[in-house]
């Protein structure tokens, strides 16, 4: 009986050690990612290096390689994490099935803008970067992007519900993808200017966002009406 107890106790202790090691490993990875994120936001991707990350947290480069394969691995983790925060906000706004399509569309666009404004340095560094490593995550203007890019997919689906074009022919889907891409691009431009002109005040910022949402939805309606006329002809 004592042997069984000792065996169980030993397994628990080994499990406890393993869990502590995993927590410590995750803590170190987070420290490295946080340092990389700060360098990226302040100095740009071109200045990001394993050596600079190591110097910032007073580690040797060899330790960084113990947790990440290389700089590209760190960049991919940063992009995945930032995109995950953005998608969580968008998904939450799009999940309320009780809202009419126009309200859902408005909430989705507002959620994107507000989520981006909550991480200004990271957002600017990512969206203004022309690095191929970053562009593979941020491009969305190519044909078919509404199927491959999760955020654009949500916007595309909301637009189809709003315009009543879900499940229609390819021409209608192509039109809604273009509309989603233009809205996404104009939202990006608005966010960047709001970040750059941060001293305009909260009231003016709110007015600009509200006016932009009204403009975008009115434009979507106009484009949708044009598509309906073309289909009738």
Image (cartoon, rainbow, N blue to C red):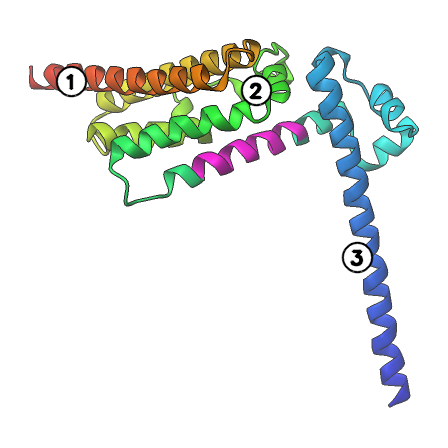
Toward the viewer: 170 or 172? 172
Q: Is residue 179 above or below residue 5?
A: above
Place of residue 198 in the rendered image (x, y in percent of width and height, measured from the top left): 56, 13
Q: Is residue 30 left or right of residue 142?
A: right
Q: Residue at x 34, y 44 (%)?
A: 96
Going from N to C along the chain, the mark reached first, 1 or 3, is 3
Q: Is residue 142 visible?
A: no
Toward the viewer: 166 or 197? 197
Bounds of the magenta span?
78-91
Q: Is residue 84 above or below residue 130?
A: below
**Is disc 2 placed on a helix, strand or loop?**
helix
Mark 2: give few (<14), some (14-19) or many (20+) Cα within 10 Å.
few
Mark 3: give few (<14), some (14-19) or many (20+) Cα within 10 Å.
few
| Residue at the spot of label 2 | 136
Point out the image quarter for the C terminus: top left
Q: Is residue 110 left or right of residue 54?
A: left
Q: Which mark is residue 19?
A: 3
Point out the image quarter for the N terminus: bottom right
Query: In this figure, what is the number of numbered marks?
Result: 3
Would you say the magenta stretch is mainly helix, strand or loop?
A: helix
Badge nearest the viewer, 1 or 2: 1
Q: Is residue 149 above or below residue 6?
A: above
Measured Cα–Cα span from mark 1 to mark 2 = 34 Å
**Residue lying farthest bottom?**
1
| Residue at the spot of label 1 | 225
Place of residue 231 in the rendered image (x, y in percent of width and height, measured from the top left): 12, 19
Going from N to C along the chain, the mark reached first, 3 or 2, is 3
Q: Which mark is residue 182?
A: none
Place of residue 69 in the rendered image (x, y in percent of width and height, measured from the top left): 78, 31
Measured Cα–Cα span from mark 3 to mark 2 = 35 Å
Going from N to C along the chain, the mark reached first, 1 or 2, is 2
Confirm or deny contact between disc 3 and disc 2 (CB under 8 A). Answer: no
């Amino acid at each position: 009986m004592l042997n069984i107890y000792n065996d169980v106790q030993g397994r628990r202790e080994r499990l406890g050690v393993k869990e502590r090691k995993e927590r410590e490993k995750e803590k170190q990875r987070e420290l490295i990612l946080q340092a990389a994120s700060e360098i990226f936001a302040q100095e740009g991707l071109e200045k990001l290096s394993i050596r600079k990350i190591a110097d910032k947290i007073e580690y040797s480069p060899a330790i960084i390689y113990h947790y990440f394969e290389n700089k590209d691995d760190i960049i991919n983790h940063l992009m995945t994490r930032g995109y995950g925060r953005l998608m969580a906000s968008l998904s939450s706004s799009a999940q309320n099935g009780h809202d009419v399509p126009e309200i859902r569309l408005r909430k989705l666009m507002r959620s994107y803008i507000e989520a981006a404004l909550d991480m200004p340095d990271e957002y600017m560094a990512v969206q203004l970067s022309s690095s191929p490593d970053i562009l593979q995550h941020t491009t969305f203007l190519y044909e078919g992007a509404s199927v491959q890019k999760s955020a654009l997919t949500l916007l595309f689906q909301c637009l189809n519900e709003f315009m009543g074009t879900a499940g229609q022919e390819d021409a209608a889907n192509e039109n809604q993808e273009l509309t989603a891409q233009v809205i996404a691009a104009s939202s990006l431009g608005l966010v960047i200017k709001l970040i750059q002109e941060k001293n305009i005040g909260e009231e003016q910022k709110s007015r600009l966002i509200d006016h932009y949402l009204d403009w975008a939805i009115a434009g979507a309606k106009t484009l949708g009406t044009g598509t309906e006329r073309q289909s009738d002809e």
